[in-house]
Amino acid sequence: MTAQLSESEKKFLEFDWTDSRWQDYLRNLEPTPPQSKILKWKKKFYKSKIDSDFDVTTSVGEPAAAPSSSGPTRAPTTDSTAPAGASANEDRPSAGPPPQHFQPGPGFHMPPPPPPSAPRFSGLKGKLSLGLMAMSLSCSVLALLGSRWVRFVVMATMAGLFLDITTQYPLKFSMEYLQHIALLDSFQTLLFGMCLAAAPSLFVVVLSPAVTALIAVCDGVVTLCGPRGEFSNMSLGGYKDKAVEMATSIAVTNRDEWLTQRARSEILLGVYSIFLIFFGKGSLIFCFLFYTSMRIRCMMSVHSQTAFKQLDGAITGLVDKPQCPGIIRKGYHTLRTFLRNQVDMERMAQQQQQQNQARSQGGGGLMSKCAIM
């Protein structure tokens, strides 16, 4: 297959799509093209900006089994198809690993966040953010030794996320600013971290912040020490190249797997907290905060949706067996339907519309005018 490719096609396949020229080109496309059309725009960009002799009608880069599918990506949600320079998890600068599209839950339709006004990890604030993430990651191991390290890991991760967001999006006290950063995974993770601050001091609490810190540190290594990074010329023998290779494996190649593992750890924390209540050691307040946070997570995070679907598939396979008592099967399916409705944005939008109509007609009391989320 490679022998049949022209020299121009070979260079197209070898082109680094984290290049800032492609990131700027993609950022200016209105509307942002879907994943299934991204290869076409890559070819147009390559011909107009890189190689004028390149043939945009070539089938190079298309999967052999499905020529009409999306462009060459390593993972379903990881590619240079989002605005450059997003958050700690799903949005990165053009000099680092390729950023990701915002992937909302079912029925949720919002555009990706706007491009950042400053590169990630730039300036003193960006470096301090990376340092806090590295400190949080290293102290995660110490959380096995004492509960006080659990709080420290959570707080250090939250501080690092806050600095990471405000480095790229300088802090503004406006509703428009909140609407923009609300689409960032780092902001959603920061909100979830506030919930973790009220969690019991257990090692399982550290798992989600530790994965967040790990991905952020790997993003920093690739961004700062990569080919176009600030410290790309630093000579550390073969150690720097090995570190960049390992960081790329985590932050780019296997990013979705790590984020899904983070979502699983968050679900594990919720299940464990419920069991603690039955033994008189849990907190109802934390369970309520956790439920609210996970509800937002499932609406806006494809990785949380994936983790819950996998858990649901495993439980459904057990309760649907003939040996399972009918009352347990019916109870689980009732709970399953209830939880699914809690994150169904289309259904919630319809309910909100009905409430607005009732208000306009003067119906309903004070409680009917309260619409959370």
Image (spheres, helix red, strand yellow):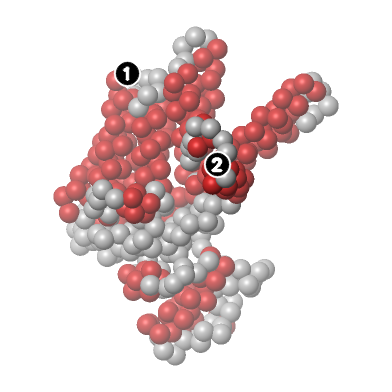
Nearest to the eye among marks 1 and 2: give it. 2
Q: Which residue is mark 2?
A: 362
- Percent coordinates x, y for residue 123 in the rendering: 17, 54
Left or right: residue 68 compared with residue 98: right
- Percent coordinates x, y for residue 145 in the rendering: 33, 19
Mark linked to residue 28: none
Q: Taking 68 as reference, is 291 above or below it?
A: above
Residue at screen point 29% across, 50% down = 174
Residue at screen point 28% across, 27% down = 152
Q: Residue furthest top?
A: 280
Q: Residue furthest bottom?
A: 53
Sooner in the amino-acid sequence: mark 1 or mark 2: 1
Left or right: residue 340 compared with residue 159: right
For the residue pair 362 and 287, the one nearer the viewer reads as 362
Q: Which residue is mark 1?
A: 146
- Percent coordinates x, y for residue 138 in the rendering: 29, 34
What secondary structure is found at the residue carrying circle 2? Answer: loop
For the residue pair 74 and 302, the one nearer the viewer reads as 302
What secondary structure is found at the residue carrying circle 1? Answer: loop
Give residue 169's quadrant in the image: bottom left
> Which residue type carries mark 2?
Gly
- Percent coordinates x, y for residue 76 in the rendering: 54, 57
